[in-house]
Image: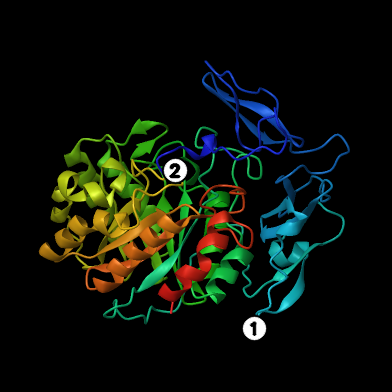
Amino acid sequence: MKHILSALALAGAVMGDAGAYERCGGQGWTGSTTCVSGFTCTVSNDWYSQCLPVPVQNNGQAGPYGQCGGRGWNGTTVCTDGYRCKFINGWYSQCVLASGSLTNSTDSSTTLLTVTVSSTSLSSEPLATQTPWTTTGAWTTTSTPSSTAPLSTAPASTEPASAPGKLKWFGVSESAAEFAPDKIPGVVGQDYSFPDIQSINGLIKEGYNIFRIPFLLERMASPSLSSPLQTDYLNSITEIINAITKQGKHAILDAHNYGRYNGNIITDTQAFQTFWKNLAGKFSDNANVIFDLNNEYHDLEQTLVLQLNQAGIDGVRASGAKTQYIFAEGNSYSGAWTWTKVNDNQKALVDPENKLIYEMHQYLDADGSGSGTDCVSSTIGKERLADATKWLRDNNKVGVIGEYAGGANDQCKAAVTGMLDHMQDNSDVWMGALWWGAGPWWHEYRYSFEAPSGVGYQSYNNALKKYTA
């Protein structure tokens, strides 16, 4: 997405108060400076303040979307009224709306159970709570975190290349760990979260087979790109990756940084190569992991984009990761509709393993940013992909749409399905598509694919499932 996630605006419940995650202050701001109950106006910088959850209420209970459990957690395990403590992964449980459970699934193949996590099941370090904490949900995977960054393993991919009239991959971006890029390293549960494994499992049961996991370079490697990886953050991301890939599905590690590190354009290609060598090495035995080198480069010198992508490819392959796909994005937010005019030089990229895929993004509103719910026309989807389709075929390349979405209206639905139909008709060059986006903090976001209540999920899931078959 073109916007920075720390500025995510979600609808407020009380007239006059800024809603959850809405803006509430900053230079030139003339709107409300008070937040809805359970949220407080927090200064991000001189230009922007945002309504963020109050971590602990006056009564000692965890606030909305606050942390309520996990390895090493020594705070409260009780949520404020209307919220329940939901297990996200071994390191993190979160207070979510009590109505947000997926346990009402009627899928007979889903086993509903209570998972009890004891301190000894996670590590030798005790949980701070006096008793094990539990969660009830549709749970189909387990994993055992370790105190050091684990290697990720999965069965070798046996999926064929895209068959005529069918996309190889169809899935969703799971956005959470890249929130609040202005808060580094940030506080998990307050500034950022991690994708919900149970929600992902639900989508897998519905046929989705690929999930993009955005992360921040600054949280993964600090204080520089070439620094050792940050164990706790890597462990949490790895647990999500393993939960997906152990089921034979693909997981994308997406460096969601727009070609920047700590706000500055990345120019040190050697450091970028070192970062990808370090990270890819942790997943070199997992054939179902995909490396998305950098999300939506923008306003970079075009040759630098080429050099950074090539450095990323070289780093991945130098790590010993030989069987995994690599996704390379382009400049100008990697737009498919501008690809041939902006990113033609990316055809010079070389992958010795010949598993390079060009990742493009395409939204269907007037400026192609994904900031609106209206689509230009019912045919705009296939029209915006036409030139990119020809470029891929003319250059003997293959591509994927790593982000797309549409508003909850008939014109957008026609535009989205028209775009996907075009991709299936040209599946010799298009490998797949991923909706933007799902994640536990998207709430009322216009495109939210977080089941069961996300606007995008409710509006599009039935229409999209035909592409998973």
Left or right: 92 as drawn, with respect to 312: right
State which quarter of the image contains the N terminus. Answer: top left
Which dot, 2 or 1, sits closer to the camera?
2
Q: Which residue is mark 2?
A: 372
Left or right: 90 as drawn, with respect to 397: right
> At 14% from the left edge and 48% from the top edge, which residue is drawn?
345
Within 10 angstroms of label 1, few (less than 14), some, or many (20 or more) residues?
A: few
- CA–CA distance between discs 2 and 1? 38 Å
Instruction: Tell which residue pokes out farthest to the left in this image.
Output: 394
Percent position (x, y) of residue 416?
38, 60
Within 10 angstroms of label 2, few (less than 14), some, or many (20 or more) residues?
A: some
Residue sitting nearer the eye, 384 or 403: 384
> At 55% from the left edge and 34% from the top edge, which residue is drawn?
183
Percent position (x, y) of residue 179?
53, 42
Percent position (x, y) of residue 235?
56, 56
Which secondary structure, mark 1?
Answer: loop
Q: Which residue is mark 1?
A: 109
> At 50% from the left edge and 37% from the top edge, which residue is drawn?
181
State which quarter of the image contains the C terminus. Answer: bottom left
Residue sitting nearer the eye, 70 or 78: 78
Q: Amino acid at mark 2?
A: Gly
